[in-house]
Image (cartoon, rainbow, N blue to C red):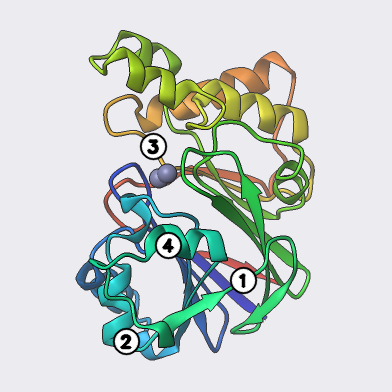
Amino acid sequence: MKLNFCSLSSGSSGNCYYLGNEFHGILIDAGISATSIRKFLKNMDISMQTIMGVLITHNHTDHIKGLEVLIRKNSLPAFTSNKIWKSILSPRNKISTDCIREIPLMKKFHLAGFDIEAFPVCHDAPETIGFHICAGDKKITIATDLGHICQTAAPYIRAANLLVIESNYDEQMLANGSYPHFLKARIKSDHGHLGNHQTSAFLADNISDNLNIICLAHLSKNNNTPELVLQSLQQTFSERGIALNRQQQISVLNRNMPTDMIRLTE
Ligand SMILES: [Zn+2]
Ligand SMILES: [Zn+2]
């Protein structure tokens, strides 16, 4: 089975990810405009007709900005929990009930040839979820907004062959930056975001030969750089004597433009 993944946009200004097999695709979050999503997919020769639905992680704007237009113009179903739907839907938001699909947490459902399980993560929205997606023997986990990795989320993250995980801020840049105290505290809290050292430490503690591709995601615009993300990971791995094998690769996802397509085959 052919399996393709790419990030269309990843970061505090907008998130959208594509996962596809040879027949269909799904999107995870729609935090950039519907026009950009359509344009980026077209540039990669992916037809909107092949997209079978959108999975939504939570109600923050950087994850749902383009959702309403995207699903209305393309008659797409969108999938998230009951509690997250309640936090998204409002009189201002004209999402048609035809497009709304409620999913349970920690229970598999099937879409476009994928077995998908949503799991709860700790973040400052009414509810936030990550997704664990199985295609044949390949497992993909996406966890982009979480203040810490709780015991419920950890097994889904550990089980991934391809992992998209947040590395939001450099601890020093955040501490020395211009954000007001309350915002710094919010970001650093257990319900905020993962800092570079937190993500590096978790990966160092949990890396296995099954984890082939690590995509470091959701970088802050003001408190991080791709260089610092990689530096933190390399330093932590070298301090612990961890060496990657030849199949393993690490990439930092672009904030404002699509990455190259990552191809997994089984
Ligand atoms: Zn976010
Ligand atoms: Zn968020």
Amino acid type indicated by mark 3: Leu
Residue at numbered disc 4: 29
- 259 versus 245 height, above or below: below
**Quarter occupied by residue 30:** bottom left
Residue at numbered disc 2: 74
In this picture, residue 222 sits left or right of residue 26: left
In this picture, residue 137 sits left or right of residue 173: right
- Asked if the residues shown at circle 1 and circle 2 are in contact, with their CB atoms under 8 angstroms apart, the answer is no
Q: Quadrant of ligand 1?
A: top left
* Among numbered discs 4 and 3, the one appearing first in the sequence: 4
**Quarter occupied by residue 226:** top left
Q: Nearer the viewer, mark 2 or mark 3?
A: 2
Q: Residues within 10 Å of mark 2 (few under 14, many from 20)?
A: some
The spot of residue 100 in percent (x, y) is: 46, 79
Residue at numbered disc 1: 103
Residue 56 visible here: no
Residue at numbered disc 3: 219
